[in-house]
Amino acid sequence: MTRDIKLMAGAFVGMGVLHFVKPGPFERIVPKVLPRKKELVYASGVVEIAAGALMLNDRTRRLGGLGAVALLLGVFPANVQMAADVVRSRRAPRWYKAGTIARLPLQLPMIRIALKAARS
């Protein structure tokens, strides 16, 4: 297993745990049209933890990588919502606004790593 897959798997597990420890920030970025924000945050946390854990094992890496791709695509609207909210905010510092916008295209290399995990 390559270092990038290990790092991404660890990040997925860590961020998934944060969905349970501090759900508030995640709830705020769920698109406004979606109901049951807390439940969606918990569900995405479970999927994130599972995908990360599955990527760490040779026998389950394919499933974990595919799950990670599905999750990244599924939560992209929340990332867009977060960027839109931050850009409209008068209180958010410029560096934070830039960071939330810059992270949107970073989904592509993450999807590439997840697909690499699925192929390995």
Image (cartoon, rainbow, N blue to C red):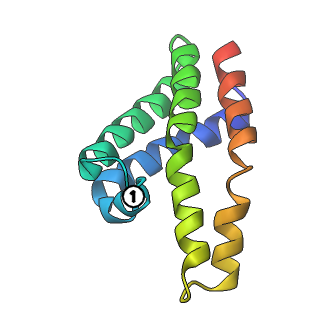
Most distant residue in the front direction: 33
Residue 120, visible in the rendered structure: no
Name the residue type under label 1: Phe
Query: Is residue 37 or residue 54 the one in the foreground?
Result: 37
Q: Residue at x 41, y 37 (%)?
A: 49
Q: Residue at x 75, y 40 (%)?
A: 109
- Give the quarter of the image for residue 65: top right
- Give the quarter of the image for residue 107: top right
Residue 14, relative to residue 84: is it above or below? above
Q: Judge the density around disc 1: few (<14), some (14-19), many (≥20) Cα neighbours within 10 Å.
A: many
Residue 3, relative to residue 17: is it above or below? above
Most distant residue in the top direction: 59
Residue 70, visible in the rendered structure: yes
Picture coordinates of residue 8, whole percent (x, y): 61, 40
Q: Residue at x 58, y 55 (%)?
A: 80
Picture coordinates of residue 59, whole percent (x, y): 53, 10
Picture coordinates of residue 48, whole percent (x, y): 44, 37
Say which residue label 1 marks.
26
Q: Is residue 23 left or right of residue 110?
A: left
Q: Is residue 60 left or right of residue 120?
A: left
Q: Quadrant of the N terminus?
A: top right
Picture coordinates of residue 112, whole percent (x, y): 74, 31
Q: Is residue 21 left or right of residue 51?
A: left
